[in-house]
């Protein structure tokens, strides 16, 4: 991943509603969620959530699929993995075990 792509992704996540929507989609897994379901789950207006999902989509963090009259969104896990890899690329002076999640180190 290029630095500019990472900056775009971080900028998309640097807003509370977008971060909440993204985390909700990660939690939803491969089934994803319809835009209306996301808005309802987060207590947001549908048009506002649509705009936020568009920003996340533009950053490559979510993918979408039309289902009839609605759009279902999914976390773009390969892109998320690339972003994580970018962050820890040169982690801990060659000791990647130090970069493991906290619960993995216990």
Image: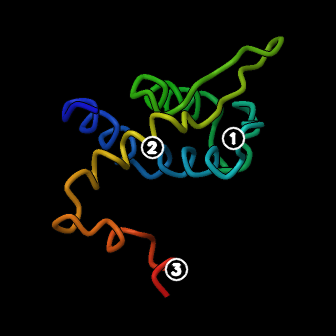
- As drawn, 96 above or below 48: below
Residue that badge 3 annotates: 103
Q: Would you identify the image quadrant in which residue 21 lies?
A: top right
Q: Position of residue 3 (x, y in %)?
A: 19, 35
Rendering quarter of residue 88: bottom left
Q: Is residue 78 left or right of residue 32?
A: left
Q: To which residue does mark 2 refer?
A: 81
Tag 3 or tag 2, which sits nearer the N-term?
2
Q: Are marks 1 and 2 in contact (CB under 8 Å)?
A: no
What element does badge 1 sit on?
helix
Q: Residue furthest front?
A: 94
Mark earlier in primary sequence (3, 1): 1
**Residue 22 screen position, x and y as percent:** 54, 44
Q: Residue at x 67, y 50 (%)?
A: 43
Task: Point out the residue furthest to the left here.
Answer: 93
Determine whether 36 is above or below 16 in the image: above
* Residue 59 relative to residue 49: left or right: left
Nearer mark to the viewer, of 1 and 2: 2
Residue 38 badge: 1
Residue lying at 75% horizontally and 31% vertically, measured from the top left: 34
Q: Quadrant of residue 7?
A: top left
Residue 96 numbered mark, or none: none
């Amino acid at each position: 991943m290029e630095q500019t792509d990472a900056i775009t992704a971080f900028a998309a996540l640097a807003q509370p509603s977008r971060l909440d929507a993204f985390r909700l989609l990660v939690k939803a897994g491969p089934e994803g969620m319809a835009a209306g379901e996301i808005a309802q789950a987060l207590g947001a207006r549908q048009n506002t959530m649509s705009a936020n999902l568009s920003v996340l989509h533009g950053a490559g963090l979510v993918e979408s699929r039309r289902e009839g009259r609605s759009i279902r969104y999914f976390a773009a896990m390969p892109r998320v993995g690339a972003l994580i890899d970018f962050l820890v690329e040169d982690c801990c002076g060659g000791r990647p075990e130090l970069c493991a999640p906290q619960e993995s180190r216990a």
